[in-house]
Image (tube, grey):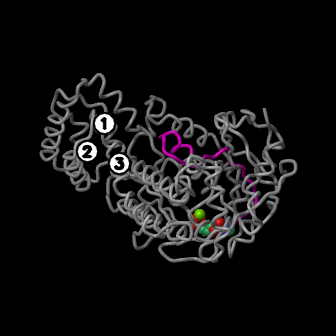
Amino acid sequence: MHTFADLIANTRFAALPDRFYSLVAPTPLPAPHLVAWNSALATELDLPAQPGDDLPAYLVGNALPKHAGPLASVYCGHQFGVYVSQLGDGRAILIGEARDSSGTLQEIQLKGAGPTPYSRRGDGRAVLRSSIREYLCSEAMHGLGIPTTRALAIAGSPERVWRETAETAAVVTRVAPTFVRFGHFEYFFYQNEHDALRALADWTITHCYPACQSAAQPYLALLDAVIERTALMIAHWQAVGFCHGVMNTDNMSILGLTLDYGPFGFLDGFDAGHVCNHSDESGRYAYNQQPQIALWNLQCLAQAMLPLLERDDAIAALHRFQPLFEEAFSDLLQRKLGFDAWQETDWALVTGLLELMQAAGTDWTIFWRTLSHTPSTSQAPAALRDLFLDRDAFDGWFAAYRERLLLNHGDDAIRLPAMQQANPAYVLRNHLAEVAIRQAEAGDFSEIARLQACLAQPFEERAEYAGYAAAPPDWADTLSVSCSS
Ligand code: AMP
Ligand code: MG
């Protein structure tokens, strides 16, 4: 068993040349206290399942692991389509690494630990509200089986942080094999530092994509692998109805992990053009734009890697995104619909369904979960039909669906339990996070723990969590999330 004091201090990232980062210590926060501790993840990392008294000091960076060389990395990126020449870890500080139970080294980052040379005009802090959202959503995504960075803890402090109003500071302890982003590659490309670019690609291959080492063209294999993982991640987002909100290239993980939880949202009522981020006025990152934005971002990455690649090879690699995405998405839809295999004609069935859902604003999660409980032997039950405005049109769709199910080999006794493992009962709807936030701001952190326990197993319906599966209450209409965090 390890503790925070003996995390691995000489991180893999620190082995890169100095121009990749700045050594910077966290800025102390007064009176730190524990808000949330993810004991399951702690156990995976061989850290204590039960937090000790000295833990909050480590979680805000007031105390550091022995021999630590805390650092913030430099990157750049395209934000809302616009190139920004220098960004970087403006409030996240890497303090060490831990080896997880599968033997993988995981970076431990404190987000909100104070200013760094990359903070620009920011204060280096994160507020309790956004820290709770990041913590809960990271773990909800993990529970859903979606590639994501993880969250180990939240620590709070009475220190005031000014956003639209006065709030209090908090720090999320984030965990991932690496937090390298597309923007890291872009930075060295646009700085014209091609040696550094190559060093970064080599580092990424060595530590994250070792299989690329033996490829005929390792850098092309790296690009291929990132394209594949990104396509898979986006397919998961679309299937579960997750909207990221700020798909800038600096928020795109080189590992294809969902990264930087800000103004994200899960679809409630289906709207293909749903924009979860109040600050995204043009709808650039709307739900139905996410796949093509991912490709746009991958183009930025490929562009940045051009000094290491043949141009035609990079273009050919990018052309694989769309088929990879469609393959991954159809696999997930096949499971959601309960089909043994996917047929090209099934796209028409899905399109027909989406049109009906769009017209009625049908709740995405409730529809799929209800379908997972619907036998194929009868007409559609009221619980399903009533989710649609044009019930006759839905009956028509359901008749076609039942017909299609005849191609399955097994019966409902096999299909329905499998569908219940593909269609979650619970997702982190905005209003659920909001309830946990309001209680935490009043000093009661129990709702965070309760919600996290539910979302860790989103496919297992439990009576005690029935309220979490319901459609949002009326008051949720007034909730809006923005980049303010
Ligand atoms: P985001 O939109 O949250 O992904 O952040 C974009 C950039 O702004 C990143 O370089 C962040 O590190 C930086 N940033 C965001 N908020 C703050 C803050 N409060 N203080 C310092 N830097 C920040
Ligand atoms: Mg970011």
Label 1 and label 3: CA atoms lie apart by 21 Å
The dot on residue 127 is none
Residue 203 falls in image quadrant: bottom right
Q: Can residue 296 be seen in the rendering of this structure?
A: yes
Observer-nearest residue: 459 or 187?
A: 187
Instruction: Tell me the magenta residue range.
Output: 139-161
- Tell me: 353 left or right of 471: left
Q: The residue under label 3 is which amino acid type?
A: Phe
Give neighbour class at mark 2: few <14, some 14-19, many 20+ (Cα, 10 Å). Answer: many
Which residue has dot 1 on it?
370
Ligand 2, image quadrant it occupies: bottom right
Where is residue 368 shown, x and y percent of the image?
Answer: 32, 40
Spatial CA span between label 3 and label 2: 24 Å
Mark 1 or 3: the one toward you? 3
**Label 2 amino acid?**
Leu
Q: Residue furthest front?
A: 216
**Residue marked by disc 3:** 329
In the rendered image, the vertical position of residue 99 relative to residue 300, given as above or below:
above
Q: How many marks?
A: 3
Q: Is residue 142 magenta?
A: yes
State the separation of the CA atoms marked 1 and 2. Answer: 10 Å
Q: Secondary structure at mark 1?
A: helix
Taking depth in this image into account, of 327 and 44 the one nearest to the observer is 327
Q: Secondary structure at mark 2?
A: loop
* Quadrant of the snapshot with the C terminus: bottom right
In front of the other: label 1 or label 2? 1
The residue that disc 2 covers is: 387
Q: Are marks 3 and 2 in contact (CB under 8 Å)?
A: no
